[in-house]
Amino acid sequence: MTGTGSAILGEVDQAALRELAAAFSAAAPLAARCEALLGRETLRLQDLPVTDNLMLADVNRQGLARSGGYLVSSGGTTDRPKFAYVPHHQGARQVAAAWQPMRPGDVMLNLFAPGRTWAAHYFYNRMAEECGAFTVPMGPMEPAEIAEWCPTLARLGVNVLAGTPTSIAAFLAAARADGPVIEKVVWVGEPVDKACLAAIASQPQPVQLWGNYGSIETWVIAANTPACPADVLHLLPGQVLELDQPRPLLTRAGQGWATRLMRYPLGDRLEAAACRCGKPCGLRVLGRADDQMKFCGTLVSISQVHEVLGELPEVEAVHLHLCCTADDQPLTAVEQMTALVRIRDGHRGDGDRIRAHLLTRVYDLGFIAGDVPGSVTVSVIGALPVNARTGKTQRFVLCTPARPCASRADTAKHQFA
């Protein structure tokens, strides 16, 4: 079963389908259905049941009963954390068999934060091991630390950065001339934005861009190389992606991966994409599947707000403060939105112009702003909030009666009503 720009990307055979049905029969809610499927002469991918995070955790925990593993989590910023069980090897050998961002002798500076059930720091240490590279397990660095460490990192021969696009851009912006010569950046966790691309372009030497895509529940799904555009990734072997469902469904076949997956709904909207590198099974991440908010009674896409503000050449990055009147399902009760905007170096930030562009391009926001004065505001600021645990620039934060937002007076340079 193969997809080439169709509704299904990837392939899976009968043996793999049966192995998955047998494995997921261990999850109590699926036992009867999976056992019935095993009695069929022929199985189709669509015959397998759709799973959820609790089912995945149950099956993967049972699979690690003898060997043990890591218990890691995602989320917690705008939703409850989702926990996952992964083996100590983290599937790094399987990933490295298809994607090798480092070579023997490379020295990788690991900027991902360790601890707090966040997995990226440990995974990239394992990836360096599989690729035969050295690791400097540093974690997040403040600008002053980066400058101070630059001569040492240069002496160590650091030539690879691994981190989120936010942390990579911050490192390159703060690095001194006597710092390490970076040849590659390995990114994950958020899209490569203008700030990251500008920081890479500012380097005196060429810098390769290597990225991958996945989540805590799915681990690594797809990856790209310097031969690919930053926004096109390729499904790894053994993965099958159903794109014609309300949410894309991911199935993973074969042994040695970090997690078992059977028709698991992803949290992002995806589309098949051709790639200039010529490899098959290309995909593009379009944004979150659940990014709509009910703003003053009208549905508005959070991704669209980001995309429209990103059209302006002076806008480097955006963060939204969403003030809600409900603690339960707060995105259904948004009453005020402030767009915090960081301006690119060398450009002037005109908040009135940015707000006018937003209200013109997002039709419904224009009506809301006219009917409810003060409901849509823009602040031009020097630095956007970064999640200390994940190193990502937060796309939005929800302020609710039980969890009110801190005052923005300390960060906002200008407030435009």
Image (cartoon, grey):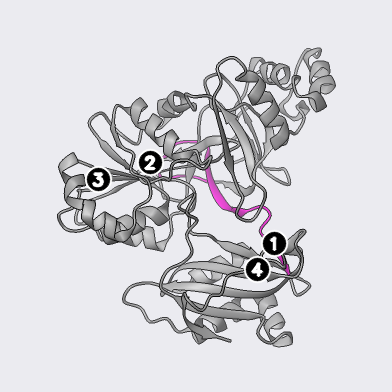
397 w.r.t. 26: above or below: below
Callout 4 amino acid: Pro
Image quadrant in which the C terminus is located: bottom right
In screen coordinates, is 123 left or right of 79?
left
Which residue has dot 3 on it? Answer: 183
Badge 2 marks a residue whose secondary structure is: loop
Residue 225: which numbered mark, if any? 2
Is 41 on the left-hand or right-hand side of 92?
right
Name the residue nearer the viewer: 131 or 275. 131
Identify the amino acid type marked 3.
Glu
Q: Are marks 1 and 2 in contact (CB under 8 Å)?
A: no
Q: CA distance from mark 3 to mark 2?
A: 13 Å
CA gap between label 1 and label 2 equals 32 Å
Disc 1 target residue: 292
Range of magenta residues? 273-294
Looking at the image, residue 399 lies above or below residue 35:
below
* N-terminal-most mark, 3 or 2: 3
Q: Which residue is mark 4?
A: 404
| Residue depth check, mark 3 versus mark 4: number of the one nearer the observer | 4
